[in-house]
Each structure stands twice: as C-alpha cells, then as structure tokens.
Image (cartoon, coloured by chain):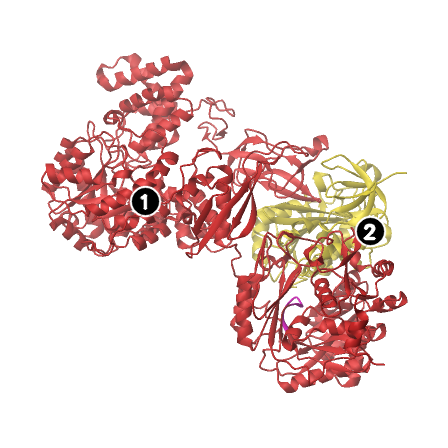
Chain colours: A red, B yellow
Amino acid sequence: MKNSFEDIVEKIRGRRILVANRGIPARRIVRSIREVFQAVPIMTATDVDKTAPFTSGAQELLLLGENSRAYLDVDRIIALAKGRKIEAIHPGWGFVSEDETFPKRCEEAGILFIGPPTEPMRFLGNKVEVRKLAQKLGVPVVPGSEGAVSVEEARRMAHELGFPVMLKAEGGGGGRGIYEVFREDQLEDAFQKASVLAQASFGNPRLYVEKLLIGVRHIEIQVVADRYGNVFTFDERDCTVQRNHQKLVEITPSPWKGMTSELRDRLKDYSKKLVLAVGYYSLATVEFLVDQDGTPYLIEVNTRLQVEHGVTECRYGVDIVEEQIAIAFGSKLRFNDKNTLPFNWAMQCRINCEDPQSNFSPNAGIITRYLSPGSQGVRVDSCVSAGYEFPSQYDSAAALLIAYGKNWPKILGIMDRCLREYTIGGVKTTIPFHRKIVAHPRFRAGDFDTNFVSNTPELMLYKDREAEALRLSHLVAEISARGFNPFVQLGVYRGRTDKCMGRFAPVLPAANFDEHISPYPRGDRQALLDFVRDSGYVHFMDTTTRDITQSNSGNRFRLAEDALIGPYLDNCGFFSLENGGGAHFHVAMLANMTYPFTEAEKWNRFAPKTLKQILIRSTNVLGYKPQPKNLMRLTGEMICEHYDVVRCFDFLNHIENMRPFAEVVMSHQAALFEPAISLSWAKGFDVPHYMGVLEEILAMMASVAGVSKKKAATMISLGLKDMAGVCPPRFVRALVIAIRKKYPMLVVHYHRHYTDGLFVPAVGAAAEAGAHIIDTAIGASVRWYGQGEVLSTAAFIEDELGLKTNLNKDMIRSCNFVLKQIMPYYDRYTAPYFQGIDYDVVEHGMPGGATSSSQEGALKQGYIHLLPYMLRFLAGTRKIIRYHDVTPGSQITWNTAFLAVTGAFKQGGERAVRRLLRVLEKVVTTPEKSLPEETRKERLMIYRESNDAFRQLLLGKFGRLPLGFPPDWVYESAFGPEFKQAIRNRTEASPLTTLKDMDIQAEKANLSTRLGRDASAEELVMYLNHPGDALKTIEFKRNFGDPNNLPLDVWFEGLEPCQDLVFNDSDGKPHHMLILDISHPDHRGMSVVRYVLNSEHFSFQVKVAEALVGTSGPQIMGDKGNPYHVVAPSNGDLWVTHVKQGDAVRQGQEICNISIMKQEKAVLAQVDGMVLRVLKAADYKEDKKMVPVKEGELLVELGTIPTVCAGCAKPVPMVECNFCPDCGCRLKSN
Amino acid sequence: MKGLGIFYCSADPLSRTGIPSGTKVGSDEDWQSDIIRLGPWEKCSPWVETKLINWSRSSFSPERIGVVLCQECSSALDLAWTLVGANAAEAWNSVLCARQTMGRGQLRRQWFSPAGNLYAAVVLPSVSPSWANFLPLFVGSGVLFGLQTLGVSCQIKWPNDLMLHRTKVGGVLVEERCGVAVAGIGLNLKRGPDGEMLRENAAFPASCLSYHGYAFTAIGLWTHLVDFLQVWYERTVAAGSPSALVSLIHDHIALLGCRVVVSDRGASSVSGRILGLAQDGGLRLAVGHEEIVIHSGSISVMQS
C-alpha cells in the first residue's frame, strides 16, 4: 500500500531519528527531522564536537568518545543506536554516507536507513558498473576503459583515445584519486605511482583509463525517487567553479549560454533512466561533464544527499531532506512536473576556514567574531558561532551561503552584499576569495570552465584585514591596559592608575574660513618673490606645528591636532606654514605612526590656501648622516609634490652639499628654494665671514640655474638660521644691512630661536634692517627654545619700529584658543624637562631643544651633577673646533662634552673633571706660543673620550669645516698614536663626491619582500631615509589603522573602564567603544581587556608585565618585529646554542637550533649585533639534554655593536671597556 | 611534473679521489655503470666549488630538475646548503654523493657512509605554515611509498627512520634555514653499520636493502625517488591537508600497539604503548590510562 506524505508524518511523529554525522550536514538534517515530522532528532558527537554550536538543534547526542575518527565506525554507531532505541539513521554527506554496506547493516540491526537500499547503491556508486549500465542505456560516458586495466591495456587504450588521458583510482571519488597524463612517455611511470597512491589512499590499487576532457563544465542533475517507481528530476546545478576537483560555487540554473532547454531535458532524461534501471530510490545526483559544444559525458552518480542540495531547494521552494526522510519511511513522492516548478535562481558559496592565499591551508582556532548576513534572498547553513574553537580534526567547512532571487544579476548582487556583510573573525576564511570570484567578469558572464580558479591567479589578490574600527579598538585596549602608549617612544610615562588629564573635547570657535583670501601667489615662485619684495610690509612664517618646541612637543604634533588648528592657521595671513621636515619627518614615523607625505597631502586639503614650508638638512636629507645623491633627488622630488617652500641648510655651511636639492627644486616652477646660512656668534663668525658664505650660495645657485649671481639672487629667498638663538640684535642688524646693500633684490627670511631671551629685539632688528620674512608661532605653543610669539612680535614691529604687517589677528586669537586646549597634553607627556630661558646659551651654544633633551639624558644616566661642567666644556670646545650649533653638529658637540666629562669623572671623580676644565680653559685663553709644555701634554686628554661621529667630523666626512681644520693636537687627542694618518686622511671635499648611489631598485625589492606586497612610492622614500622606523609605521598601520582617528587623550592615556569613546574610522563612519573591564595581569603578564565596540563584545589580551615563572621554566616572550630579539620560530626542543653573552654575531649567522619532530630549524641572527643575554641554552652533545621552547619565546637578546676596535676590527662588547678584549689594544672611543 | 629525468653529473666521476682501500670495489663499480647506463650527463670539471655553483646556476631551471652527482663530500646536506646559499639550487634540485666523510643524522650524530649506499639531499619547496612541521613526515612517507612502487614494503619508525622487517634501513633529516628546508635522505643499500658502530641504545639493529634481497644502485634509485617525491608532493602537500597525510601514513607506522620507551626528550623519558599518529604529526602514546602526544624523542622497544 502506498503511503501518502501525510500518513508518514503521522507515523514518524515522536520517533527517534539519528544523524550519523557532524557539522553542517548534521545540523541541516536535524532541522528537517524537527520541522514537519516533530520527530526526536539525535546527533552523533565525539568529544571535540559534543558542545559545538551545531549540536544545539539536536534533542539528544549519541556520544562517541574521544576518538575523533569515530564517525567512521559504522558498527559501533549502529550498536550504540540500537541501545538508544533509535529507529532510523540518516548518514548525511561525507564520512560513511557512501558506504554501501551501511544500509544493509542497519537493516540487520532493525534500523531504517534514510537513503537508498544497498544493492542499487552499490551499483550506481561503482564507477565501472554505472559506466557499463550507461552504455547499455545509451547515456554517453567519457571514453575510456571498461573496468580496471593493466599497464599494457592502459597504453593501448591511451593510444585509441589520444592523449591527454586520466588514470582514475577505482576506489576514488569526489575528485580524489585522479592522475593526468599528457604524454606517452609519462604513462608507465605515472601508472606505477598512481597505483601505489591509490593503494595508499583507498586501499585499492586498481586503475582505469579515461580521456581527459579539456575546457568542460561540471553539470549535475538532482534526482529524487520513491519506492514505487516515481522519479522527479530537478533543473541542473552548475558546479564548474572548482579547485582540485573540489567544488567552491554551485549555481542553479547554469548561467552558461550553452545550457539550452534541450540539453537540460536530455540530462534529466539520462538521469531518470539510470535511476529507474536499477530500482533505486531516495536521493541521487547524476554528474556530467559538458564540453563547449554541449556534448555531455556521464562521470558518476552520487548516492547521497549533497552539499549543494540547498540551491535546488531555493530554486523550487521545497525541502529535499524532508522528502528523503518521508520516502525512506515509505512515502509516495510528492513532486511532479505540475506541482513542482522552478521560480528562482540560486547560488551557493562554500565558506571554509581556509586561507586561499596560503594554498587553501585549513585554519583552525577560536572564532572571535561572527556576524551572519541576513534579509531577503539569503540562506545560511553554518556550523559555527562566535567563541567557537574551530577544530583542526575535521574538514574546514564553516558555512554554506546561498543567495536566491528572480534572476542571475539579482543573485550576483545579493551574494556580493552578503559576502560584504559576513564577518568571521579570528580565522582566515574563503569569504574574501569568494568576493573576488563573484566580482570577476568571466564569472558574471557565465563564461568559465573547471580550470577557472587555477587559471585565474588574480582571484588570490586581495587584502584580508579586519575592519579598521576593530583594529583601532585593539590599539585603544592596548594603551588602556598599559596606561601609556608604547608607540610614542616616551617610556613608561604614566601608569594605569595615574591621574588622567581628562577627556579631550576641544571647543572650536566659529570662524568664517571663506572670508580670507591669501595674497600670496601660489604655483609660481617668481611671482611670489616679486610680491614679497614689493609688498611693503613684514611677512610672517608660522612654525607652530613643526619647529616651535623642537624635539619635545613641536615635532611630535600629530596630524589629528594639525587638522584641528590647520584651518585657522590657513586664514591668519601668514606667508607660509612650516608643517614638515627636520625632525618631524622622522618623528611622524617614530612616534606618531603616520606616513609623513600622506600627512603633507592632508594638510594641503584642510589648509589649502597658505604656502607650505619644509626644512631639509642638505646631504643629511631628513636624517642625521650624509646620504647619497640619488636618495636626495628621489626625496626631493616627493617633497616638491607637497611643499611650496624648501628651506635647506648645512650645519657646516658647506654649500656644495645643497646642490642636488637645489637642482631638484629649481626644476619645479612652483617651488621656492631657500638656501639658509647657519648662524653662530663667536670669534671668526662675523659679517664678512657670512657674506663670503652668501657669495658661495649665489655662485652655486647661479651654476644650477645657469644665470649670473645677481640674477640668481632674484630667484631664491635666503634663509638666516640661528638655531641656538645666540646672535645679538646688533649683529643681526649689521648682517641684514650688509646683505640688502649688496643684493637689494634678494628676499631675506630670518629664523631664530628664543634661547637667549632676546627674540623680539633681534627679530625687530632684522625687520628694521630690511629682512622680508620672519618666523613666529602661535602664543599657546611658545616655549623658550622655540620661536617667539606672533602677536607680541607684530606689536613690537608695528608700534615700536613703525613697520607694517598684514595679519588676520582675530583668526590668530581663535587659533590660539584652540591651541590652548591642546597644549596641556603635549606639555605633560612630551616635554617634562627644562623649558625656561638660559642666557648662557651665548657661551655654550646648545640649541634649545637639545638642552632640554641633554638635561634629560644626563638625569637618566645619573650625571645630572655634572651638567654645569658639561656646559662649561661646551663653551670651551666651541673655541677650538668651530662650527654651527645646529643639527647634527649640536648633537656631536653635546656627545663630545658628555663623554669627556663623564670619562674624566669615572677616572678621578669631580677633581678630574675640574682638572679637565682647567686645562681646557688654559688652552683657549693662552696663545699657542706661550703654552707651557706640561699643558701641551695635558690637553691631549680633552678629546680622548670622543666618539666616532666626532672623529668623522674632524676628518671632514660631514663636509668642510667652516673656519678650517682645528690644530693638530686635537687630532692627536682624538685619534691617539695614529693621528698623523688621520691628518693625512682629512678631506675638504663634499661627502657627495665619495658617497656611492644606493641601489634603489634593490632596496625596493627588499622592502616589498619584507612587506609581502609592492611598496608604495611613499613607503619606499620613508624606508630609504629611516628603514627601521618606516617598517614599524607600515606594520602599525596594517595592525591598527590610522591612529589619527583617536582623540588626543586616548592616544596618551587610553580609556578608563566605563568611559565612552566615539571615534570615526578613515571613511568617516562613527564607532562607539566602551571598556567594561581591564583584568589584573595573569601569570603570563597578560591583562584581558573586555570591551564593547558598536554593541559587540570583545576580549583583547595585552602583555602588561613580564611573565612569572611557569611550569616549564620561565618564558619571556620576544618581540617578533624586533630584529634584536632571537625568538623560537615554533614550539620545539632547543638542542644546541652556538653563542654566549658578549659574542658578536653577523646577520644570517646560526644562533641556535631547534628540533621540531626531528626537523632541525636553524635560528639565525637577523642583524649584526652583540649577544646581550642568553635566556635559554642547550648543548645536547655534551649533556644529552634538550630544552623545550615555546613559539615566540625569547631565546637570545642581541644589542647593537657599540664600537669596533681600531686595532683588530673586532666589535667591543661593553660600553665600559677601555681595552679591546680580543687584542688588548687601548680603545679610543667611549 | 616538469622535465623529470634530466640530470646532471658534476665532477669527473672518479678523478677526485681514489677508491679507499678496504671499500668493496663493487659498489663504486655500480656507481660507474649507472653513470654510463643513465647518461648522458653534463660534466662540471675540474672540481671547484665556485665552478659547480656557476654551473648549476646556468644549468638548472624550473624545466630541468637537476641532480648533482658527487663522488665524495663531507655530506650531501653540506653540499646542498652550499648551493642553496649561493642561489644555485631551487626546489627539487638535489645532491647525491657516493661517499660522505662526515655524514650526519639528527642532532649531528654520525651517519655511517661507506660507498654503495644512497646519500642524498633535496631542496624542498616552501610550504604554507600549516605544513611547516610536517616536512619530515612528508619526506619519510614519500620515500616509503616511493620504495613501495618498487616492491619494498617499509614502515616508518616515527618520525624519521625507515624500517624493514624490524631493522633500520634508512633515515630522513630535514634541516631548515631562513625558511628554506633541505631534506637529507640516507638509505643503506649495500651495507649497514656493524654492531659496534651503532650508537648506544639504538632501538633496532641496522641492516641494508640488499640483505633483504633488494638490489638497488644509488643513482638509479635516487632518480626514481626524487621524481616520486614530487608526485607525492602534488598529491599530499599541494592538494591535501596535513591530517589527510597523517591518515595515509597511519597504517605504515612501525611498532603500532607496541610498548616503547621514549628518551632524548626535553623532559624526562616516558614509556607507553604506541597508538598512532596525532593530527599534528606527533606520536600518540597510551601512558597508563592517559593518552599523550609527544613531539620529540627517540623510540626504543621496551625490553620485557
């Protein structure tokens, strides 16, 4: 008697049905068991799976224990099921679903098998049998052998068919066990191998031969049949998008234009015949390859429910699994051509936890985020959830994402937006890869074959990153847990519980930014110079966002705060805004994690009217040591793209050093080149001297521009740069008058610092003498070592001197108000040291910012009591070796003083220091002729402790010394016995003549390798100038995004628990973050930050302290990005360490070796360095002991090589060494 | 597979050193006759390291997988690293030498290296991180199944020894530097070390394939194996997952179910019953009522 579906529903209700499967199929089938039948769904589960999210729909679990392969043990499952009074078993797909003995064994146990009966299953499932049957029924098959063959038969067959052919394992299936042979001479060999592999893989060495079809599509027909001979065939599924015969995307109906209704009917007819011929019932899928002409070839029949059944369900609005269950219980098939009609298109993407960019390697781990797509046209069958630890033991399928709708364009659109909505965090998935497929024009045109993925490598090109808001939230968590921001490189400047400055919520005064029109012509330097010359008033450059407080807050201003005050500054009527260069270029990367030229580009957007000015250091470009010409030019070109005025100085006034920049800037019509004279005020540095320097500048410019000196003077502006702030007003007046008199057309731009307290009178003197442009800053930012304040300077010039200015003073006041709100944060965290006036600068010549930082250095190293001596040393040495007190000269002088004074102190305490200074005093005050012999000897101690940079300076390696080389005894003091050689080696040539060009292409390749992608032009220039900090910034951006999206207080202090933060991402979308809790550090030193981001909860671990001793010995985790940290590459056993503390190592040298399952991994030094400490060591050959290590654990810490022995050229290990440990030679430096 | 079967011979085969006295001459005769039988070869002579490097740079290409044959060197691994270091060898290029003066096993143990046996080193392709720790198992199983195509049914003694009838006939050592991995493969074809040359506590007696009735010559066997390793790579590493490889190897693990002692570990030694391989390539041991997975150590059978 035929049962109707309704009868079956009645029959099944409340019965116990087992799904012998896991993951997606188990969950899918449980749903159908529950929905209409109201039966009791039970699912098998191993220990790994027993609490997995996909088990939630099951009423009970059939626990299989710890063996993860237990799903394959049919007998055990049946025995357990019997004990649990289970009446029917559904095998799902995969695992044992194709085991033809399963139905029979179920039957023997008295359990109903939800699937086909054993005999027809065996018949259709066997490729050789089904092939014979097909030929009998007139169903075309792939030409090939009838059954398994020997090598000889294979060869004969291949000749008949023509190459290429396939060798297929009889026991294979699902794309596995297929070997392609393209040439006859490969056949024998391939056959042997394939046979062994088949034996190894499937336990059956037998092979058959088939023609290898090229350029084909994979098309399959879903069939459902009942026990009574009723068969229904659904429209085709196109599963052509595959990789290694594994399906990735399935579509119904096929979007291929060759898919005609006639072909469709043919395939359905073939499928129906095959199923009917063997008395098969339940579900089956008949798979064909179809060539470009539309000729089909049967490949195999799958006798089970398939992964891609869902698209058919969506096309027809039916439940195939429900029907399969009913049929197994004896129901009559409900579907027929009248009541079951297609009305949708549908497409499925298989979302797997695999990394397509790493050869689709499976990717187990905790899923940290899970946001599923939704709304109309979407179906998601997944087995995961947030917080689920995706296991490594099973296949990598995480979800089946189906889009369905009225037509192909609609489902393409739905799928694309679903793939954008779908968020699975913590593991790599195929989601971004599917987006590339869905976007590909050939896919959209339906024009692809089974090799589409392997022949379309561009599908792999995508960035798989978390959203920027999430990355930024990690940064906030990191800063919050520590209480300080490690990236600003200011040490532990505050603790987590320290008082906060309070929230930064700036009040921005209303201003009409459209009102002001800048009078300065932009884009034409000649017009600009003419305007300045003819204007009849004094012009102001603003240094607020760059030079004002130098190495403290000024250079550290972030783009975020620049963007707040920039629009005001843009409307103050300034000649230019100094917003880049000098130390800022470096600090932008070192501490602000910002790309410097991207920053300059943004400036030109939020402050578009005013000229932008940059400072560069001649051959030292934007760093601290001479660079080759080609790097100067490359950097110069990029500078000219973003800046209008390029001020260039050389600390030795060696004008030739500026030439490459002069050439680049002068070749740009828009850019104004401003060569600057470095100024000092001391014996020899007088007006005639500087007039001589000016002549050199004009001669060089004349040569670059191909004009006379007089003409050259009309094409540039001249900078006068008093970085130390030492030149008195009378001297400045005299100098400017002399310049204006000699070259009346030359535009003069005067720059000085406040250090001596005489800023306003000095600038006034310059203006009165005819200087056109002067440098000032906005009041709230003014500190003693920067420039003076704009409004007071203007008042002095206007009211006391009677000169004119043209400033928008109200706008300056508004700007000052904004700045007043910003400065407290920078003052507190970036400038905690000396900020006052020091008139003695006229003696010691130490530039402002340098005094503050040198005081900090002396304090931190415990020498603060020697600071007065150091300043006296500076005052003395300036009279012996004479150059200018600007970067990097000021650093060299400071280091020389520091080393001399601390060196003397180490030898004989303050007495020795006083003696040193007495000798120095005598040397500089007594003429050489009258100097006693004893003092001549004693003075050799003065530079004994000097460092390499100082000696390079003496040799002329930075450039020509402005007042000539110092006396010979200085060399004897600095170089020791070899001083005569040093004197012979001196040079007055520009370093540019000897510095070789760098191989920029090679460096670019090197950078791209390190980044794993092409480096941008800006990244290359960053890298060439400051490699280490550039890499750090690039990596920071990848990990965290743009930090300028975070407000100032959060950047320095982080968030307290329960504080709200609203920030924008780089697309301007707002996000809300709230920290719930920051835990105490655990034994590993890790603190867990729990927080909410846009209503989603997250946990983020931050290492805030060193780990305590653990069970397997103390572990200190290294910093993988730090090349001086030698870390374990993976978990394993350390068995040999080749180095000990104090050893010098070369880049690429093997430091130690780790055995990981008998693979021996050499751990190499990434840089040249010195072993500071060895944290873990082993010597297996000696003591037969290995030491377990954890991935990322710090094994050896390296330091920079402090110095090299002049005697034997070996590195000297410790700073304190006075004698070389290798050769015993006396060491000069340190 | 590209350009299989094209090989290069480096030195003038017998010119570098004479045959040391006491060595069975027959073994070197095999080497010579292989060279004649399997040629033609390209020669790089006289033997100078820089010449070899230049020669291999110009001769090897992705289409022409090269084998450098060498009469005698310190170790095939050393020579392979020299070529890798000079960018003169890429994936699947290999070195085969007739004798090694300083052959090494794991932890720099000595590897007995008289003439007549197979001493090879092959540069492995770079693999995704998920495969990084499976290279020894990949190479070991590749050699195992490669030998199986020739009718030899070996087993793997976890993780890197090849066993035949409970005797050790070969071993695999993978070394990695700077992300490049080179596998050293030693197979005793004609001779195994004598009893006294075995290291103390060696788990099994050593023997050689000829003792079990298999007559292979080094060059002939290696050209087959290096070829097969690439097939094996395509089927396992390129197309599958580590766990699939583990399940393929499972039935070929030596000493399944036996009680063994594992020593030479970072921690103390442990004894237990071998259950098979873990998903991560480690060895599963039943210790008392617990199952543990070990990732290092030397295995020996418990004497009862």
**Horizontal side, residue A260 vs residue A698: left or right:** right
Q: Which residues are magenta?
A: A239-247
Crowdedness of circle 2 by 10 Å Cα count: few (<14), some, many (20+)?
many
The residue beneath circle 2 is B209
Viewer-closest of A170 and B148: A170
Whole-percent x and y of residue B73?
A: 67, 44
Residue A310 in the figure: left or right of residue A645: right
* Callout 2: SS: loop
Residue A891 vs A436, above or below: the answer is above
Q: Which mark is residue A581?
A: 1
Say if the magenta span includes residue A861. Answer: no
Amino acid identity at mark 1: Gly
Q: Quadrant of the N terminus of chain B?
A: bottom right
Q: Is residue A243 magenta?
A: yes
- Pinpoint the chain carrying mark 2: B
- Image disc number at residue A745: none
Residue A198 appears in view: yes
Q: Quadrant of residue B4?
A: bottom right
Q: Is residue A101 above or below residue A1210?
A: below
Share a chain, discs 2 and 1?
Answer: no
Q: Toward the viewer: A707 or A64?
A: A64
The x and y percentages for residue A551 are 34, 36
**What separation in Å lies between label 2 and label 1 (alpha carbons)?**
72 Å
In the image shown, does A537 or A1183 lie closer to the viewer? Answer: A537
Q: Residue furthest bottom?
A: A262
Residue A146 appears in the rendering: no
Q: Are marks 2 and 1 in contact (CB under 8 Å)?
A: no
Question: Where residue A440 sits: x, y (%)?
Answer: 52, 70
Viewport quadrant of the C terminus of chain B? top right
Residue A585, how many percent across, how many down? 36, 44
Name the dominant secondary structure of the magenta segment: strand
